[in-house]
């Protein structure tokens, strides 16, 4: 009998507080509009994760900034595990969340954000399937970053000396992975919504 690997999904998001959420979209949408868009995208992501859980056994945690545990539970429900992202740049926060997951005997871990509407349950299922044969799975974003990273085991070097929020994130990560001789699986490129020009109809 083939046992399934212990699969874990980490969702990075923030509490949708107007003025502090999706700040690069505020010139186009205003404080409340930007926060509301983030709120809708996070809720959509959670709905897709719940669809994924109907297909495959996967544990989920939400790593958040802003707000507090009570506010997050009021917003997204009590049936999710919540953790603060903590201090540091994006790389340090992602690395910390992965190490924490693998310390709890997870075998495959994936991190996603909530600003890529193309991430659905099928994309997530494909990412976990690829992790069965690859050390690293990446979902390239059209802006040069990535919307998903999956690992087995955690590899801290992938999160250091990267200029987060730039078009170099994806190519630099691939370059590091190749130097480490990691097997890499790629997902379809998808668009993030970060800036006013991303708000195409």
Image: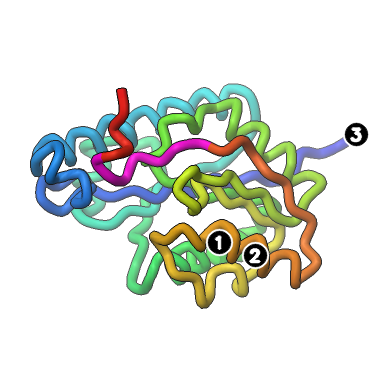
Report which residue position mark 1 lands on.
98
Q: CA distance from mark 1 to mark 2?
A: 6 Å
Rendering coords of residue 179 (x, y %)? 75, 72
Rendering coords of residue 82 (x, y %)? 37, 50
Q: Mark 3 or mark 2: name the one nearer the start of the chain.
A: 3
Q: CA distance from mark 1 to mark 3?
A: 28 Å
> Could you tell me which secondary element the residue under label 3 belongs to?
loop
Is disc 2 surrounded by few (<14), some (14 to 19) or many (20+) residues within 10 Å? many
Residue 49 visible, this angle: no
Q: CA distance from mark 3 to mark 2?
A: 27 Å
Magenta stretch contains residue 10: no
> In the orientation shown, which residue stands out farthest toward the right?
1
Circles 1 and 2: CB atoms closer than 8 Å:
yes
Mark 3 or 2: the one toward you: 2
- Work out whether residue 6 or residue 17 is closer to the camera in this orientation and state it: 17
The mark tally for this picture is 3
Rendering coords of residue 149 (x, y %)? 58, 51
Report which residue position mark 2 lands on.
154
Circles 3 and 2: CB atoms closer than 8 Å:
no
Identify which residue is drawn at 68% across, 46% down: 6
Dot label at residue 1: 3
Q: Main secondary structure of the magenta part?
A: loop
Identify which residue is drawn at 34% across, 40% down: 193
Does residue 135 lie above or below 117 as drawn?
below
Magenta-tinted stretch: 190-196
Q: Is residue 152 left or right of residue 80?
A: right
Mark 1 or 3: the one toward you: 1
Quarter holding the N terminus is top right
Q: Mark 1 or mark 2: name the one nearer the start of the chain.
A: 1
């Amino acid at each position: 009998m083939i046992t399934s690997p212990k699969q874990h999904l980490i969702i990075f998001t923030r509490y949708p507080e107007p003025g502090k959420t999706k700040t690069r979209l505020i010139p186009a949408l205003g404080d409340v509009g930007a926060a509301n868009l983030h709120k809708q995208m996070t809720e959509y992501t959670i709905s897709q994760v719940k669809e994924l859980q109907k297909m495959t056994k996967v544990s989920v945690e939400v790593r958040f900034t802003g707000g507090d545990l009570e506010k997050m539970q009021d917003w997204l429900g009590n049936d999710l595990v919540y953790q603060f992202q903590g201090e540091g740049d994006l790389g340090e926060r992602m690395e910390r969340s992965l190490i924490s997951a693998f310390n709890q005997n997870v075998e495959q871990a994936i991190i996603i954000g909530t600003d890529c509407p193309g991430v659905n349950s099928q994309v997530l299922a494909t990412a976990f399937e690829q992790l069965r044969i690859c050390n690293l799975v990446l979902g390239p974003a059209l802006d040069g970053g990535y919307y998903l990273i999956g690992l087995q085991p955690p590899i801290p070097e992938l999160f250091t000396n990267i200029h987060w929020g730039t078009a170099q994130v994806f190519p630099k990560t691939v370059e590091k992975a190749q130097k480490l001789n990691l097997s890499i699986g790629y997902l379809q490129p998808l668009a993030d919504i970060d800036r006013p020009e991303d708000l195409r109809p």
